[in-house]
Every structure is written in structure tokens, then in C-alpha cells.
Image (cartoon, rainbow, N blue to C red):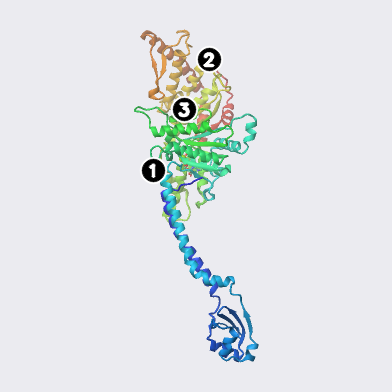
Amino acid sequence: MKIIKNGMKNGMTLYKNILWAVLTLFIVAAVFSLLFETGKKPLELTMTGLVEKINKGEIQTIVVQGNDLLIDLKNGDKGTAKKESESGLSQTLNNYGVNAKALQSVVLEIKDQSGFYFWMNLLLPILLPLIVIGAMFWFIFRQAKSGAGQAFSFGKSNLKMFGSFKDRISFKDVAGLKEAKQELEEVVDFLKNPKKFLEMGARIPRGVLLIGPPGTGKTLLARALAGEANVPFFHISASEFVEMFVGVGASRTRDAFATAKKAAPSILFVDEIDAVGRERGAGVGGGHDEREQTLNQILVEMDGFDRDSNVIVLAATNRPDILDRALIRPGRFDRQVFLDLPDIKDREEILKIHSKGKPLAKEVDLRKVAVRTPGFSGADLANLMNEAAIFAARNSRKIVTQDDLFSSIEKVMLGPERKNRVITQKEKEITAYHEAGHALVAASLKDADPVHKVSIVSRGRAGGYTLKLPLEEQHLRNRTQFLTDIAVALGGYVAEKFVFGEMSTGASSDLQQASKMARALVTQFGMSEKLGPQTFGETQELIFLGREISTAKNYSENMATKIDDEVRNFIDHAHTAAKKIVSSRRKVLDAIAKALIEKETLEQEDFNKLVGQFKLKPLGI
Ligand code: ADP
Ligand code: MG
Ligand code: ZN
């Protein structure tokens, strides 16, 4: 794989290389000075001096190495001398008048001239500078080459590989998000034991789309997956596909996928895919060509994987609503993993994770901080923790106190970074009663789908949500079920009105949904007794406006009035039923709302246990 570094990194490596070169020089110099200058400097003797010492009997050995004499004195000193190059040692000594008898007691040793030592002595002074200069040139050229390479390889993807050990994280470092983690663990299992699944004829999922509001930990989760999966993990931000030059998006995409395929089994993570994955053809005035080509290339690449090519594409977005439908169809990003804003328990856990390495005062209760931060995302909480530490440090304290944490809540809330809305205590109460209303009506009516989860953690534009799923996959719904659905949809509005005396804007989308259902009941499904089995209106999809659907009216004004009346009737009927339930079961409503304010999220079990205490009789509609 070719990795192209970006400009800033280039600059950094240049400095690093220079540093290395200087350091190497330094070390080489140090080593040589050690090698050649051990201990005391040897005595430099003239020939006359040497002969004098021999005659006095002070010399132990003389080692002859070429023209150099290395001398060991009897008193332990060392010395050197030079003999004449033309004549042998004994002749030279004789010329200087050595005493033959004294010479006999001296050990003479002749060393081979062609020894390693000799050559080193000869060559090193010449070679060393050459080596150093050569190394420098090599560094500089390498630098220049990568710079030039960058200019010519913009069609290459800016693919980065995760997994450097320094910032390696695992699922442990991600709080909450249990379902998302499970889903991703399954993905890892696919990659590690593809046989198991292929033998069953199962198709390994191509793509997994992480969906969630900003700051909920999509990128973090992907990084954690990289740490867990133990397979090559490539990472690119979709905006990098279409960066600098026109026309490179498609080829970069090709390159990124090719790299991932070569390293299979592997994971390719495309962050912020909405940058290129926006619906094609939508919007007036034509699409962004470059973006469309890139998107098309992604689609082609995802189809191009063989059935058993072990590459899974992971992508993240916070705008699933604008993604091209071709991207989400089976065979591409067929798996979608939702990341919600954290509830009170998860918030506490996130705070705990980010308090690591920050000395907290003993009295600090992170739960209390979690209670005060509904609507905060993981990123907000991380930010809060950091602000608290900064605040403590600025006041020259060594520990973070509870007050530091509390005052940082406001700071983060008011700060410019926040994108999600924050809920006040009053709002929280209203939302709790609203959701409790939905849940209570659903739990009371015989034909309603069971409640799977009630939560006041905001999701999308809704303040909270009550998740009810049908027992079995249903394609056919009857009139009673529709009426029940409408009553459940109105439950939130009814509860708000009943408890607080007025409705909030939070109920408006419910009303919209209820009206839509009632209208469909009459105009599309022909379920009105009065109007009989017929449909009204002709729907038509207008492609050039994106997903807009327009309905052409094909009935008379007279009929329109009748339709409106029937819709009104259905809604009234459901409204009455919902009102009856909420007013006669106020105690249950209060209990659910209280539990929601406390825990923010009620899973199916908790909810059933809570409502079960009241032994409610199932009602018809
Ligand atoms: P996004 O969903 O926008 O990609 P990020 O993954 O970049 O969000 O999250 C931003 C930061 O918020 C993370 O680096 C992390 O510090 C913090 N964070 C978000 N969610 C969690 C979580 N569940 N657990 C721990 N930290 C989190
Ligand atoms: Mg992100
Ligand atoms: Zn509602």
C-alpha cells in the first residue's frame, strides 16, 4: 500500500530526519573517540629515547605494526614510537646503539600489516565523511521524492490505517451503546470465521452504516472496532474523496477499495459518508457532478466485491435522511446501527471514562452530573470533564471538585460547540408525561403493539420516543388496529393536556401522524363505512423534486367534505378512547412518568414490571 502523507506531516518528517542525521553523527563521533582514546595518552618516544630505555631495562614488550611501535613499559605505562620505514627494527635499534644484551630481555612481536585494524586505520578517516554525507543526501532525496510523489498521485486515496498502538482503544473505552457494540461484534465474527457463515449459505454483510447525532461516538466506535477486530482497518473521510482536484473522487474510491481488498480480510471505514452519499438527482439545478461520480463509484465497488471477498465497509453519518436510497439497499449498507444520545446511566459511565487521569475530589458524585445533563452527547460530556479540569487548574487546585463539574455544565451548554438541544427540568417533566401517555395507552389497548422501550432521551427531532413493535411482522392491518395506532399516537398529546392543561410543540408531529393515518384509512384503504370501499386521490412521485410526492385531487368538493368528516370521526373516536384511558388511569401515568424522569429510559422488562403492578384490564377501542 502506498501511503501519502499530507503536507504538515511532510514538514514534521523533514525535521525528524535532520534530527536523526545530527544524532547519528554525534553517536559515531562518540563511539570512535571511545575506541581510540582509552585511558591515558601513550608516551611518544623518539628512537633515541626508546634505545635509552631498552638499555636501562625499562621495556617489557615492543609490538611492531608496520612502521608503528607499540611499547609496554615495565612500570605499566604505554608508549609509541616510529621506526624508519626502509630498515627493520633490530637494524634501526642497532644504528641507535642498543645494548644487545638489554635487547634480549625485551619481547618483540611483529603484527600482520593486513589486519582489520590496519585497514580501518587507513580507510576510516576517508570513508567516514563520505558515509555521513551520503546518508544526508539519502534523507534529503527521500524527502523530495515523497513530495514529488504526492503531486503525481492525487488519484490515490488518502487511506489511513488504524491500529498504531499508541491510540489504540477497545470497546471498553466506549460507554453504553450496547446494541451497536453487539452488532459490530457480529461483524468481526463474520470476518474471522467467514466459513461458518458461508457454509450456511449466508451472505456476509457488505456494509454497516452507523447512524447517530453528532458526538454520539460513531468515529470512536469505529476506532474501537479497529482495536478489537485484529484485521487491517482502513480509514478515510468521505470528504477526502472529493478534496482538491476535480475528477479524482472516483479514482480515489477505486484505489481505497482496491487497497482494502488486497489486505482482506479487512475493514474499510468511510467517515461522514453524507458528504458524497447525498441523494442523486435531488435538488434543483442538477447535482454536484463530482460527488455523484464518487457515489456511483462507491456503489459499483460495493457491488463488485465477490461473495466471499472478506471486506466489510463501515460508514458513519448523522444525516441518514439525505442518503441516496441506492446506498441503503440490501447488498450495500444493508445493516444500520443506531447510536442514540446517552441516557442517564450511560452519561454517568461516559463521565467516568473521561475522568480517567483527572484527580477527582472524594465527594464528587458523577451521577449528580449525569442527572443535570439530559440531552448532552458523549462529546459534550467529554468536553464538560475537560472544562472542569481546566477550571480547577486555573484556580491552582490539584483536584477537581463537584462544583467545578457543575459550573462546567453551563459552560458547555452555552458554548458555541453545542448542536443538540438541552432540556430543562420542566421540559423533561413534560416529555416524561408525554411519553408516559403514549406508553399507557399502548399498554391499555388490547390491539396495540407491545411497548419495547420508552425514553425521554431525544432522538432526532422528537423529544422522546415510545418504541412499540408488532408481535409478528404484519402486512395486513385492520381498522381496529389503525384506530388503536391513532389512539396511541394521540396518547402523548392527551396526557400533556390532562396534566399540564395545555399542549406543547412536542405533540405536533404526533397529531400530524394521527391525521395522516386517519386520512389514509379513508382515502387509501377504503375503510370508512360511510364512504364505502373506494379510494380517493391519485399519488404521483415527482422525481425531479427528490422524494416529494404530490397528490392530484380526483374527487368533487362535495366528496372532499365527506372525507374530512370521516377523518374527523376516526380521530374523535381515538381521541375519546385515549382521554378515557389517561383520566381513569392517572396513577399509572404518574408512575410511568416518575420512573422516566428518574431513569430516562425504560426497557420492555422494566416497563412491564412497573405497569404489571396495577393489574390493568385490557380495553377494546
Ligand atoms: P461522532 O459520532 O460525531 O463521530 P465522535 O466519535 O467523534 O462522535 O465522538 C466525539 C468524542 O466524544 C469522542 O472522542 C469521545 O471522547 C466522546 N464520546 C462520545 N461518545 C462516547 C461514549 N459512548 N463513550 C465515551 N466517550 C464518548
Ligand atoms: Mg465522527
Ligand atoms: Zn409523542
| Secondary element type, mark 1 | loop
| Lower sequence index among marks 3 and 1 | 3
Q: Which residue is mark 3?
A: 325
Q: Tell me the kind of residue under disc 2.
A: Asn
| Lower sequence index among marks 3 and 2 | 3
Q: Tell me the kind of residue under disc 3.
A: Arg
Percent position (x, y) of residue 1?
A: 51, 45
Of residues 552 and 568, the one drawn nearer to the viewer in this rendering: 552
Q: CA distance from mark 3 to mark 1?
A: 36 Å
Which class describes the residues within 10 Å of circle 3: few (<14), some (14-19), or many (20+)? some
| Secondary element type, mark 3 | helix
Of residues 169 and 147, the one drawn nearer to the viewer in this rendering: 147
Question: In percent of the image, x 58 and y 89: which residue is there?
Answer: 94
| Lower sequence index among marks 1 and 2 | 1
Q: Which residue is mark 1?
A: 415
Q: Which residue is mark 2?
A: 478
